[in-house]
Image (spheres, rainbow, N blue to C red):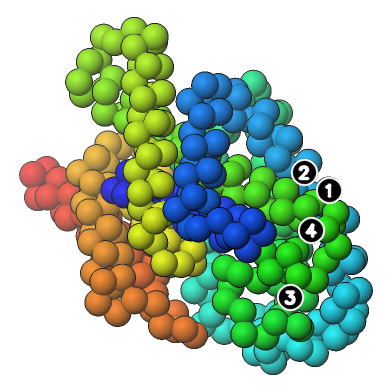
Amino acid sequence: MLWLATLSILAGQLVGIAWILSVVAGLPKWAGCLIGGGLMTAYFAAGGLLGSAWVNLVQLVVLLCGFAIVLPAALSHAGGLSAVMQAAPNEGFGAFWNGATSISFLVLLVPAFISSPGLLQKAFGAKSERAVRLGIGWNAAALFVFACVPAVLGLAARVHHAGLTQELALPTLLASDLPVGLGAILLAAIFSAEVSTADAVLFMLATSLSQDLYRRFLRPDAADRDVLRVARWAAVAGGGCGILLALVTPTIVGALSFFYAMIGATLFVPILVALHARVNRRVEVTASILAGAAAVLTVQLTLGITPGSIWTPATIGLLSASAVYGVGVAWRSATLRQRA
């Protein structure tokens, strides 16, 4: 389930890179996917977690500096922040809380971020507890800025290009509405964001294949050198599969929504149980994983995502996983009381 989910979000990031290169350089989608996927796979397979951490640091600096430079120019070209707000749909700024839509986003994103293997692996790989606290704290601050700025840039693009799709908003802004120099800076910032997320996803896939499958089940006595070799080949294979999937993935939002829904429904309950349960809950956790995954797949394939509804694949999947785990705990408790 993790492999399917990670390949889905990896494909979504590569589609984003392809759209950028399509608008700016006129490259076809397949060429953009190959360039982005090949670049990301090459430096990750060569450097692993440490190399990815240093590259991500550089990408973060490029991203934040690029947005800080470009945002004032984009707002000025659109007529100022007031003009951008007036051009936005009324339902988008009616209130801070937007009912079912806000709830569905919280259910989709919060459990997935808490249980994201990419974030957890970086936390457990940190030098000290203090490094974890500082890293997560600064990460939260950076994510808040990152969440706000692209949305405002997208609305600025909407002022002059009202018919744009979500995927083309930022690339069109940098190609049509900004001077060449500023457009290049924004391109670097967006490209950094896409590649940074993609290599984190590739790290999840490589670690799962090398540690959870190869070392745990196939060769428990494997040396670290062998596990590292398997991880590198898994990264190459994952990058290749991500590129192939990106070629047939129509939208970024669809790929990301499926990834976050699957991660939240399958990993959130097990992680909470692993951290807090005082007895072995392997059977109950396994049942919750299967129930959550089945619910997400069923709703995704039959109903999909209805705009403005709280009953999304993420919500139903998380509720199903929690309910099955609760039933399993209650059943075991009742069985133990009967035996006693």
Cα distance between the residues tagged 2 and 4: 13 Å
Cα distance between the residues tagged 4 and 3: 13 Å
Verify CB contact (< 8 Å) between mark 2 and mark 1.
yes
Mark sitting earlier along the chain (3/1): 1
Secondary element at image label 2? helix
Identity of the amino acid at label 3? Ala
Task: Name the residue carrying label 1.
Answer: 65
Identity of the amino acid at label 4? Gly
Secondary element at image label 3? helix
**In which image quadrant can residue 223 be found?**
top left
Image height check: is 184 above or below 36?
Answer: below
- Residue 183 is marked as 4
The x and y percentages for residue 5 are 36, 51
The x and y percentages for residue 10 are 45, 49
**Nearer the observer, disc 2 or disc 3?**
3
Cα distance between the residues tagged 1 and 4: 13 Å
**Nearer the observer, disc 3 or disc 1?**
3
Cα distance between the residues tagged 2 and 3: 21 Å
Image height check: is 4 above or below 41?
Answer: below
Count neighbours of disc 4 (C-alpha within 10 A) and say few if under 14, some if 14 to 19, many if 20 or more: many
Q: Is residue 133 in view?
A: no
Task: Name the residue carrying label 2.
Answer: 62
The residue at 61%/69% (across/down) is: 168
Count neighbours of disc 1 (C-alpha within 10 A) and say few if under 14, some if 14 to 19, many if 20 or more: some
Image height check: is 50 above or below 22?
Answer: above
Task: Name the residue carrying label 3.
Answer: 157
Cα distance between the residues tagged 3 and 1: 20 Å
